[in-house]
Image (cartoon, rainbow, N blue to C red):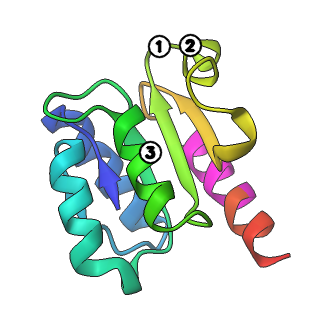
Amino acid sequence: MLVEDETQLLVVAKDMLSTLGFTVLEAVNGREALELYQQNAARMTLVVTDIGMPVMDGYELFRKLKALKPALPIIISSGFGDSEVTSRIPQEEIAGMFSKPYRFNQLREVLKSVIVRGST
């Protein structure tokens, strides 16, 4: 699942994820993402989420998804910087992180490390 409130970034990131072979369910805020997860939990293998969003931010979404499924890999995408994110979410709980803007190679490497880690 991809969670991003900025339409242009959502389109770009969805295209990148599709190019990498993922089927992408998309949400524009945390509340929508949580509902989408609850409806499709059996199909969800990972989540890529923005942090700064209206309605429900990525921090709250992260906590709620981890409460539902602690092993769910969640990748954080942020324009705030890694130290800002890890000051609110323990780094060991985050499957991967990358900074905006979305860059194909960076997204691919983060996804590859999450998938490799999950298969061992």
In this view, the residue in front, 75 or 55, is: 55
Q: What element carries label 2?
A: helix
Does residue 63 appear to the left or right of 97 in the view shown? left
Residue shown at the point (60%, 36%) measured from the top left: 97
Q: Which of marks 1 and 2 is in front?
A: 2
Q: Disc 3 and disc 2: Cα gap in Å? A: 15 Å
Does residue 43 appear to the left or right of 98 in the view shown? left
The circle drawn on residue 80 is 1
Residue 4: x %, y % from top left: 26, 40
Outermost front residue: 67
Q: Is mark 1 on a helix, strand or loop?
A: loop
> Dot 2: few (<14), some (14–19), or many (≥20) neighbours within 10 Å?
few
Give the residue type that dot 2 points to: Glu
In this view, the residue in front, 20 or 54, is: 54
The circle drawn on residue 84 is 2
Residue 10: x %, y % from top left: 24, 44
Confirm or deny contact between disc 1 and disc 2 (CB under 8 A). Answer: yes
Give the residue type that dot 1 points to: Phe
Residue shown at the point (43%, 17%) measured from the top left: 79
Residue 46: x %, y % from top left: 49, 65
